[in-house]
């Protein structure tokens, strides 16, 4: 068995290879003068684990090329983060179901797919191969416990993420709630917990994805105004698009933690163990 990582997922690919006691295949990534991408892997075996978070268009092309390069092998595709999964419906006329388009193109040529906290698990059916979506809730719980927050209030940023917050809170026997957003006028919104009060509490906002950081920055400022002692966040996939680092820093947020599904300066805990377990079990 060989593990092959895309250019931007070398660290998590290495962590998975280590746990599988498998070699990382040598890889070469470059670009032709016209902008087309080039990949080359070293020798592979009968079984290949391709690891690559789908964070941008170049990664999509690298994944397609790697799948083709390993065609003689049984391929498990591990997408620690699957981009495009949020466009899982046709919200407006003329739009694609992007999650379907991406899954169908990647599903051709692989034998199974493994993701972690994919935004909408039902889209895994579009890959057309056996699929596993792993949970990082035990890792999140261990991370929170290791920091030692004092009786944190676990908050989801919206009702849709309430179940996620509830699962994390249950692991640590903490309280949880979700935020309700009310538009006061054209310029002002209010965000407050549905049931609980944040005054003098340490609040931990949990979400599957931080993208622009806009949701989190707004929630932090409003919760601090309501008397929260501190506001921290733990997410699974930290994209930190455009000016997210600065926006979050200026919002008064405390700790920001994400997993290593996308490797950034905020990667504080690893998805490698549950992904490896899924590889071994499938
Ligand atoms: C939304 O469905 C996700 O769970 C996140 O809440 C969202 O992606 C966060 O986006 P942003 O960081 O851009 O506010």
Image (cartoon, rainbow, N blue to C red):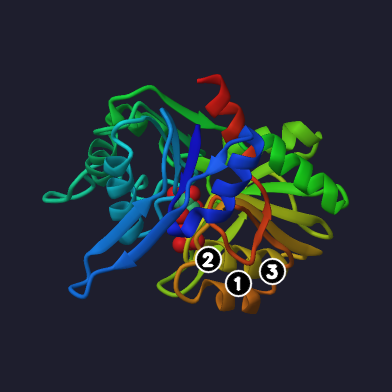
Say if mark 1 contacts mark 2, CB within 8 Å: yes
Q: Position of residue 260 (x, y in %)?
A: 60, 52
Residue 213's mark?
A: 2
Nearer the observer, 14 or 230: 14
Residue at disc 1, secondary structure: helix
Labels 3 and 1: the sequence-earlier one: 1
The residue under label 1 is 248
Residue 46 in the figure: left or right of residue 257: left
How far across and down, in percent of the image, does residue 83 sit?
A: 38, 50
Query: Mark 1 packing: few (<14 Cα in 10 Å), some, or many (20+)?
Result: many
Find disc 3 in the rendering and name its residue. 253
Residue 228 is at least partly visible in this image: no
Q: Is residue 223 above or below residue 1?
A: below
Mark number for residue 135? none
Would you say residue 23 is visible in this rendering? yes
- Taking the view exactly as shown, the residue that stands out farthest to the front is 43
Name the spot of residue 261 as percent of width and height, x first: 55, 50
Q: What element carries label 3?
A: loop
Specify whether tag 2 is near ligand 1 (CB below 8 Å): yes
Tell me whether circle 3 and circle 1 mark residues in contact (CB < 8 Å): yes
N-terminal of the pair, mark 1 or mark 2, is 2
Q: How far apart are marks 1 and 2 (CA)?
A: 6 Å
The relative height of residue 104 versus residue 92 in the rendered view (above or below) is: above
Q: Is residue 280 above or below residue 158?
A: above
Give left or right: position of 30 versus 210.
left
Quarter holding residue 218 = bottom right
Task: Give neighbour class at mark 2: few <14, some 14-19, many 20+ (Cα, 10 Å).
Answer: many
């Amino acid at each position: 068995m060989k593990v092959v990582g895309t250019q931007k997922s070398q660290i998590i690919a290495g962590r998975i290879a280590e746990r599988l006691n498998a070699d990382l295949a040598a890889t070469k990534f470059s670009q032709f003068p016209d902008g087309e991408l080039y990949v080359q892997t070293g020798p592979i075996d009968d079984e290949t684990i391709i690891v690559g978070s789908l964070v941008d268009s170049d990664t999509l092309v690298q994944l397609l090329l790697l799948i083709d390069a390993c065609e003689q092998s049984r391929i498990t595709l591990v997408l620690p983060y699957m981009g495009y999964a949020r466009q899982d419906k046709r919200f407006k006329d003329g739009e694609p179901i992007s999650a379907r388009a991406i899954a169908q193109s990647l599903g051709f040529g692989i034998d199974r797919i493994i993701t972690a906290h994919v935004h909408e698990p039902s889209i895994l059916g579009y890959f057309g191969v056996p699929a596993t979506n792993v949970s990082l809730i035990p890792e999140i719980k261990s991370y929170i416990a290791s920091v030692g927050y004092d009786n944190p209030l676990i908050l989801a940023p919206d009702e849709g993420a309430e179940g996620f917050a509830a699962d994390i809170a249950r692991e640590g026997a903490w309280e949880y709630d979700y935020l309700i957003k009310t538009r006061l006028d054209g310029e002002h919104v209010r965000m407050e917990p549905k049931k609980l009060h944040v005054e003098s509490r340490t609040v931990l906002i949990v979400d599957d994805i931080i993208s622009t950081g806009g949701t989190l920055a707004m929630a932090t400022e409003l919760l601090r105004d309501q008397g929260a002692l501190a506001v921290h966040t733990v997410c699974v996939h930290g994209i930190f698009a455009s000016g997210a680092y600065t926006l979050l820093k200026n919002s008064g947020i405390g700790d920001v933690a994400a997993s290593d599904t996308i490797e950034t300066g905020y990667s504080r805990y690893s998805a490698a163990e549950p992904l490896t377990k899924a590889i071994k079990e499938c």
